[in-house]
Image: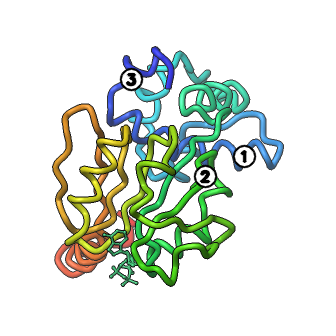
Amino acid sequence: MDIEQTKIPQATAKRLPLYYRFLNNLHTQGKLRVSSKELSDAVKVDSATIRRDFSYFGALGKKGYGYNVEYLLSFFRKTLDQDETTRVALIGVGNLGTAFLNYNFTKNNNTKIEIAFDANEERVGSEVGGVGVEHIDDLEEKLGDISVAILTVPSSAAQGIADRLVKAGISGILNFTPARISVPSNVRVHHIDLAIELQALVYFLKHYPLNEEEA
Ligand code: ATP
């Protein structure tokens, strides 16, 4: 991310990949411009928020014209480092880890899982989704300058692995384990607990049903 990025509020920054993905689709379809209403309907962010977000990167939509898709895309590419592929390591080639390796995010953006680690001897040496699986004992040696890791190990192993990743120079961890891991303040952890997300959805459906107009 470039220096300009530091001026963008975190909430806005979090929405950038969402905008990027949609605009990229529009671009592929040959669309030159998009209205904030169209964007809003597609990414489910209200248009006032979209206008405010876009004002941070100097994209001021013109009334009756909307936003220039090409301009926005080139801004997002630069800001999200989409011109450069970010190399990612995955730790824990279980069910979830295997799914990520097979998916490998190639459709939407330039992040690529390049190496995987596991403790299970039977998995070490194999390839999943074209990615080689290394032994977790070789983590420090084989990680190289990779700075982002996805954690799909059992909860009990999460903190230990996180400590080793931090020591090895990782600066971002996407934690899919239910464990809350502690890291130094210069390391960013994003925590995604799929079971809790699903439970929350079910809870909301039950207690806050959407009526037709709001849907
Ligand atoms: P998932 O929870 O991803 O669906 P699973 O149920 O198949 O996976 P888990 O027991 O959660 O299996 O383990 C996930 C993966 O993490 C397994 O492949 C396991 O071998 C690996 N693993 C377990 N402990 C460690 C560790 N300390 N270091 C690296 N990998 C580990």
Disc on the earlier residue, 1 or 2? 1
Relative vertical location of residue 129 with respect to residue 8 in this rendering, above or below? below
**Residue 98, percent across and down?**
52, 75
**Residue 128, percent across and down?**
62, 73
The reply, left or right, for residue 212 in relation to residue 193 is right
Residue that appears at 46% across and 80% down: 121
- Mark 1: few/some/many CA within 10 Å (<14, 14-19, 20+): some
Give the camera-side residue of 43 and 87: 87
Question: Which kind of residue does numbered mark 2 sit on?
Answer: Lys
| Quarter of image, ligand 1 | bottom left
Residue that appears at 41% across and 70% down: 92
- Mark 2: few/some/many CA within 10 Å (<14, 14-19, 20+): some
Q: Which residue is mark 3?
A: 8
- Marks 2 and 3, how far apart at CA: 25 Å
Point out which mark residue 26 bears: 1
Question: Which kind of residue does numbered mark 1 sit on?
Answer: Leu
Disc on the earlier residue, 2 or 3? 3
Q: Secondary structure at mark 1?
A: helix
Give the camera-side residue of 22 and 75: 75
Point out which mark residue 112 bears: 2
For the C terminus, the image quarter is bottom left
**Residue 75, percent across and down?**
61, 25
Task: Place residue 120 in its image quadrant.
Answer: bottom left
